[in-house]
Image (cartoon, grey):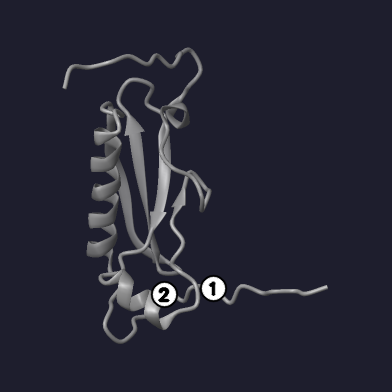
Amino acid sequence: MTVFINPGSHIGETGEGWTNTFKGAKAEAERWLKQMHEDGLLDVVLATWDETEMDGRWKFEFEHTVTKKRVTLETHGISDIETYCKRRIFSPKVYWDGSSCGAPEIEHFAAPGFQVLKSFKAT
């Protein structure tokens, strides 16, 4: 039996050729919001954020303006991912709704008393 221990991605420290800042993390959260809008999640806004760094990540809450349900994104603010990845074994983890392998879906914003409806829009 082989046991492999993940030593972590060490995003809480700055390295040569890259930084990890709140400003970068906020830009990343805004990129997520833009992508959600492009994917049709138009009623989602970036509601709150915490400027306190937690193990190299910052927490952002997105809210659906109809259901008022909030979902959390915990992301890094690494300025140069390519340089970071060249110097580290693991790529940095980003957590959507508590999962490191999740992606935004309308169902994440479901709340009691609401039903998901999907439709079309003209392009």
For marks 1 and 2, give the one nearer the viewer: 1
Q: Nearer the viewer, residue 56 or 96?
A: 96
Q: Nearer the viewer, residue 112 or 104?
A: 104
51 left or right of 54 in image: left
Q: Which residue sits furthest right?
A: 1
Question: Which secondary structure, mark 1?
Answer: loop
- Residue 102, position in %: x, y? 49, 45
74 left or right of 17 in image: right
Quarter where residue 44 is shown: top left
As displayed, is residue 3 above or below residue 40? below
Label drawn at residue 12: 2
Which residue is at a point 25% across and 49% down the rendered structure image? 31
* Quadrant assignment for the N terminus: bottom right
Label drawn at residue 8: 1
- Residue 15, position in %: x, y? 34, 84
* Quadrant assignment for the C terminus: top left
Label 1 CA crowd tier, 10 Å (few <14, some 14–19, many 20+): few
- Residue 116, position in %: x, y? 43, 17
Task: Tell me the distance, in whole angstroms, between the alpha carbons under discs 1 and 2.
Answer: 10 Å
